[in-house]
Amino acid sequence: MSEHRPTRRGVLKTAGGISAALALGGGTVLAAAGAARAAGDGNGLRVVDRNEGDPRMWYYRFATAEIGWNPAVNVLLPDDYHTSGRTYPVLYLLHGGGDGQDFITFDRPPLNIRAWTAGKPLIVVMPDGGHAGWYSNPVNSFAGPRNWENFHINQLIPWIDANFRTFAEFDGRAVSGFSMGGFGALKYAAKYWGHFASVSSHSGPAGLRGPAGGIPGGVVHWANASSAAIELGGGTVYGVPWDQNRVSMDNPCERVESYRDKRVYMVAGTSPEPTFWDRFNETAVLDTQREWRGFLDRAGIPHEWHEEPGGHFVRENRFREDLDGIVDRLRKA
């Protein structure tokens, strides 16, 4: 498989660039598809824009009190969604951070989520997560509400389950992400224990307090600096001084037992490019993933990990491998 590099790097590029067949029960099938097209308001979300014209990729934008602007989501449907009448498992796929990262990230070249999921019996939900929202409710914001955690967990997930044919259960959901989104996936899987049966982190940091890129607690410093610069108008995710309870609640290394009986998959690069941001990003990822793997090993929690040549980008071969593992782990459509 080829390895693809996004045109804009993920998370961490912030602080200095801080920057039934139709015949058999056809009426049932059409009614189910029609219900999805009628996706409407609910769970604190008001649909303000939509596009359901593509056979697979459906787009929605919402007004919500949790976010100070109108965030969006792409919902990628299986090839046979409109004709099968089946119920499907769901993958929540979280983008990285930076000015160019949003709900469309995985549908922009060179990433190709449509091709990677072709033929797979899986709904993929790709929401906005902010340029440096860190999949969190921040300690403070001077740019209006930025409660990404509330938006995703309390509003978007139940909205998806209400409007699409999903398995609304532990064995029906996976969460994965790249960079900042990889951290968000690890955080959500632990903090909301019964939501996700599979969790994956592609070049996402996996610890908050340990050394990251040679800096103790480097990921918290990084989250605070990036969110202050491009997300929260000077506010921070974890506070200054740190809200220690919040750090512990979000830290995979302090929530190890929450990963027991889940599928766990992670990827990190070992040879970043000789640029400050690529080197800092992937060194922090590698440091924290190795720390977290040590905790998992000592707890006897199975996990799959890969260290690959290269730096901070999505590796298509590993992403496709991960998708196959997700489909195998979740309830079958």
Image: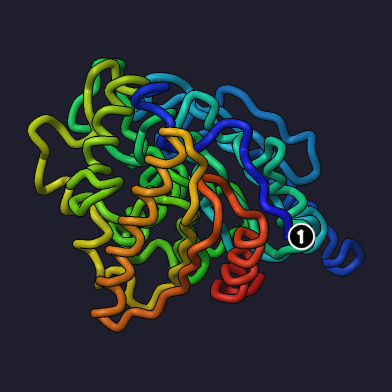
**Residue at disc 1, secondary structure:** helix
Residue type highlighted by circle 1:
Thr
Colouring scheme, one of rainbow, by chain, secondary structure, one colour? rainbow
Q: Is residue 242 left or right of residue 28?
A: left
Q: Is residue 134 left or right of residue 125?
A: left
Q: Residue at x 27, y 43 (%)?
A: 219
Q: Nearer the viewer, residue 106 or 147?
A: 106
Q: Nearer the viewer, residue 158 or 327?
A: 327
Residue 233 position, x and y percent, is 28, 16
Quadrant containing the N terminus in the rendered view = bottom right
Q: Specify whether residue 19 is in view.
A: no
Residue 111 position, x and y percent, is 68, 43
Q: Nearer the viewer, residue 115 or 207?
A: 207
Q: Which residue bears the numbered disc 1?
A: 28
Q: Residue at x 16, y 53 (%)?
A: 248
Q: Is residue 99 left or right of residue 284?
A: right
Q: Residue at x 55, y 57 (%)?
A: 309
Quadrant containing the C terminus in the rendered view = bottom right
Q: Is residue 97 above or below residue 140?
A: below
Q: Is residue 191 left or right of residue 307?
A: left
Residue 326 position, x and y percent, is 57, 68
Q: Residues within 10 Å of mark 1 (few under 14, many from 20)?
A: some
Q: Residue at x 61, y 54 (%)?
A: 315
Q: Could you say which quadrant of the image residue 190 lies in?
A: bottom left
Q: Specify whether residue 295 is in view.
A: yes
Q: Could you say which quadrant of the image residue 90 lies in?
A: bottom right
**How many numbered marks have been drawn onto this rendered protein structure?**
1
Q: Is residue 305 above or below residue 192?
A: below
Q: Is residue 26 above or below residue 247?
A: below
Residue 229 position, x and y percent, is 32, 20
Q: Which residue reaches farthest front? A: 274
